[in-house]
Image (cartoon, rainbow, N blue to C red):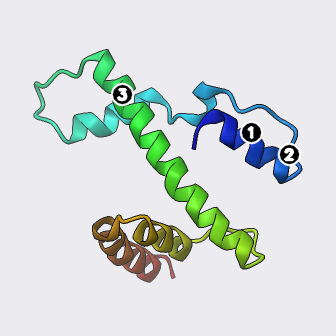
Amino acid sequence: MDREAQETQAQGLGYEFEVKEQDRWLPIANVARIMKMALPENAKIAKEAKECMQECVSEFISFITSEASEKCQQEKRKTVNGEDILFAMTSLGFENYAEALKIYLSRYREVSC
């Protein structure tokens, strides 16, 4: 969802604020830390690669969350839960990710209870 669409959606919900581009993104330090965990210890990551990944993962999260939020609105609920995220991922074509996260969510709930 681009900036203009987000502002339009926010206005439709009665919110009066402007979403700044940098406010939509995950902190670059967090993104870089996760990237480093997937690479060999001596690997270096260019600033441009970190920024690209920051924008991509932030947009992905926004995309999935927006779909989950629409489901909640249709069901007249205010809280997005794990099942909503899994539903959104599946409906948007990310079934493989949804299946893996379904297992993770189930195990997380077992440990949390």
Which residue lies under the disc numbered 2? 15
> Could you tell me how far apart the alpha carbons at marks 2 and 3 are, in whole angstroms?
29 Å
Q: Are marks 1 and 3 in contact (CB under 8 Å)?
A: no
Of tags 1 and 2, the one toward the viewer is: 1
Which residue lies under the disc numbered 1? 7
In-front residue for pair 73/111: 73
Say which element carries label 1.
helix
Which residue lies under the disc numbered 3? 52
Give how far across and how far down residue 38 sits, in percent: 19, 42
| Within-10-Å neighbours for mark 1: few <14, some 14–19, many 20+ | some
The residue at the point 67 percent across, 27 percent down is 20
> Could you tell me how far apart the alpha carbons at marks 1 and 2 are, in whole angstroms?
9 Å
Quadrant of image for the N terminus: top right
Give amino acid for label 2: Tyr
Residue 13 figure quarter: bottom right
Give amino acid for label 1: Glu
| Within-10-Å neighbours for mark 2: few <14, some 14–19, many 20+ | few
Image check: 50 left or right of 105? left
